[in-house]
Amino acid sequence: MVLAMMSILTAVALMLWSSTNLSVMIAGNQRRHTQANILADSGIQHFRSLNLSSREITRMAGDGEFVMILDQNLGDGRYYVFARPLDNDRFEVVSTGEKAGAVSTKTATFETIYEE
């Protein structure tokens, strides 16, 4: 009887530990993905602060090619930003954030308005 009770208590303890361990791993993955997402957003905001025009992007990139604009480390995370010219004074910006194996990518389209 005592041996059966000890076996049941051991099994319950192992299931509780396993469940808690899995929850901690999931929470860690969610945290890293959220941080990578924030890093990708930071890349877009950093790019916006540079105030580059579509003409400057075209000059740097060539005809429809992506050009790396930024490669920035923040703590143990990183983001990098590429841009490529589109038609009608528009350009596409792709920012990727990386944090401990988690990766998040954001894409934005900008338009330069020239007053002449």
Image (cartoon, rainbow, N blue to C red):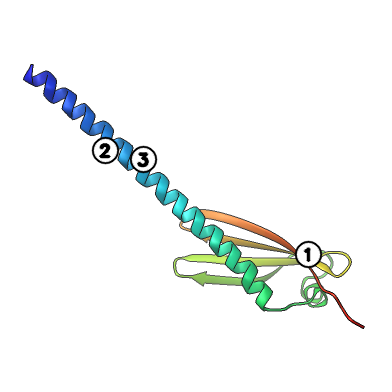
User: Which residue, as the protein is rendered here, is positioned at the far top?
Assistant: 1
In this figure, which residue is indicated by the disc labeled 2?
17
On-image quarter of the C terminus: bottom right
Identify the amino acid type marked 1: Glu
Identify the amino acid type marked 3: Leu
Gap in angstroms between the C-alphas marked 3 and 1: 43 Å
Tell me the mark number nearer the camera, choosing from 3 and 1: 3
How crowded pointer 2 is (Cα within 10 Å; few <14, some 14-19, many 20+) is rated as few
Nearer-N-terminus badge (3/2): 2
On-image quarter of the N terminus: top left
Mark 2 lies on a secondary structure that is helix
In this figure, which residue is indicated by the disc labeled 1?
65
Gap in angstroms between the C-alphas marked 1 and 2: 52 Å
* Position of residue 22 measured from the top left corner of the image (x, y, whole percent): 36, 40
Gap in angstroms between the C-alphas marked 3 and 2: 9 Å
**Residue at position x 89%, y 67% in the image:** 88
